Amino acid sequence: MITFTLSLLLLVAGYFIYGRYVARMFGCDATNPTPCQVCADGVDFIPLPTWKVFMIQFLNIAGTGPIFGAIMGAKFGVAAYLWIVLGCIFAGAVHDFLSAMLSLRNGGMGLPELVGKYLGEKTRKVMLAFSVVLLVMVGAVFVYSPAVILEKMAGTAEMWFGLIFVYYMLATVLPINKIIGRIYPLFAFSLIFMAVALLVCLYIKMPQLPELWDGLHNRALTVRPDWKQDLFPCLFITIACGAISGFHATQSPLMTRCLKSEGAARGVFYGAMITEGMVALVWATIGMYFFYDLGTPGFETMAGAAQTGFDTPAPAVVSLICNDWLGVAGGLLALIGVVAAPITSGDTALRSARLIIAEALHLTQTKVKNRFLICIPLFAVTLLLLLWQVGNPDGFNVIWQYFGWSNQALSVFTLWTLTVYLTLKHKPYVVTLIPAVFMTAVCATYLFVAPSALGMSPVVGYIVCVVSVMVSVITFYEWKREVRRKETAYQAQNHTPKRQHSVQKGRDYPHGKLKMH
């Protein structure tokens, strides 16, 4: 529990120290107008109270990610703590905050358009397709899992599929303050309350857990020698939402269009990610208690657990822990965490997809018919993917595996976009360069060594890792040198002071162009 306690304190310190540094480095200015003030449309650009924006952002990015991912990541051992803490402070929160700031400075622009602006038109098209596919997968996956759970309580899976899908359609099409703005804060509070209650239980029970000084080895191999998931890169794909997740960058523009002050951005975006990291730490610790308690393994004390605790699925761990530790109230909280959280991630995923497509087509969303014009084919594709899952016994796992890798690959695009932006603005680009290079290596290596991908030997994976790091770093510095050469030539030709032409205060996108929303 010492490592766990230190990890919690480091996350808090990271918000106040590194979070403040990143905000000052970027140059947050509370006097700048925000998108909802410049082009309010009553549908997507609607000013909301800051506390409500925070709660919606937290639930948007959280879902079941910091719960299921952290429990599965706990199987790797204490290394999960390091990844959650360092990943959250130096990668995930920076990724979420800076991508949100870039969206704020560009009129609430969505991720593909931001990537295209700084990485080029070809990359924009790739990101457009990549983002929409990822968001549709999220929608399909997060209809399936809650419906299967609810079927055990009442009704049929088909009935719940239909009800959840109807809710998706309403939440995607209606103005953001009608459904999302009203119910999300309640569910977010429930998710936070559940994490706090379990945190208290952990300190009451004080289980004997592995500590940092016990080693960072892949602890799963001590239980299952034939386990085919290597610590690197599988841990960094398994725990995504609690450390860094590309999906978050597709969600932040929803809230940049509702934020009333740029000065509140650090608390909302950096703060929401740190809060999610804390939730992930709690569940990772519960996972270690369940799998590796050095006293009595948690699963041995609970009725209904698998004989081998290591084989217990993450949703079952959530249900067993909540009911055993928190009683009837715990069962209700578990239901919210396992059912409501994925549903609320799925609907905002499809809403983000609608806005991304609308932005690409320059199609205003103030008219209901324009929203349906995009949503009908979007829902049709999601429904087909859902039906495929139902008809395929392993369909959910297949889609989830592709989602996991695609999610982290999306963070790579976002981090490189931020690195290019900071370089062009003559700001300390190293804050995003290091995470960008690291996640590039993780995603490239995972593609080669993961059992669900090419399944090659770890040696091949490590070679790929080194090559991807070298190629990405060399390519970046070659590009940077060319940019500086052009800047020098521009300054000499126009007799401008150094950096004057590349630095501007406030927004990076002309106000007049915001009208297209």
Image: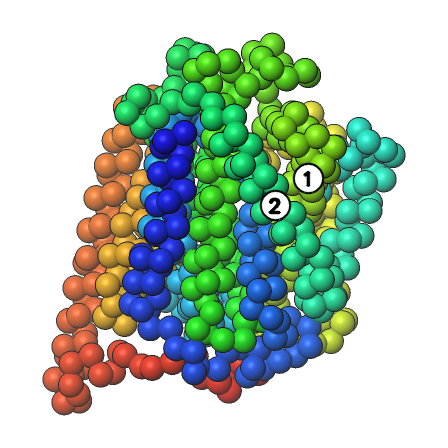
- The answer to whether residue 279 is above or below residue 446 is below
Q: Which mark is residue 333?
A: 1
Q: Is residue 408 left or right of residue 46?
A: left
Which image quarter: residue 32? bottom left
- In x, y percent, where is residue 480? 21, 63
Task: Give coordinates of residue 249: x percent, y percent.
Answer: 48, 57
Q: Amino acid at mark 2?
A: Phe
Identify the residue at horizontal 87%, vertical 34% (top origin).
155
Q: Where on the picture, by quarter, is residue 93?
A: bottom left
Q: Residues within 10 Å of mark 2 (few under 14, many from 20)?
A: few
Q: Amino acid at mark 1?
A: Leu
Residue at 34% across / 51% down in the picture? Answer: 13
Residue 25 percent across, percent down from the top left: 29, 67
Q: Position of residue 442 (x, y in %)?
A: 35, 38
Is residue 243 among the parts visible in the rendering? yes
Q: Which mark is residue 421?
A: none
Q: Quadrant of the C terminus?
A: bottom right
Whichever of callouts 1 and 2 sits on the residue coming sooner in the sequence is: 2
Q: Is residue 341 left or right of residue 125?
A: right
Residue drawn at x 60%, y 59% as measured from the top left:
56
In this view, the residue in front, 38 or 215, is 215
Disc 1 and disc 2 in contact, CB within 8 angstroms: yes
Reading the image, the residue beneath label 2 is 193
On the question of residue 405 being in view, the answer is no
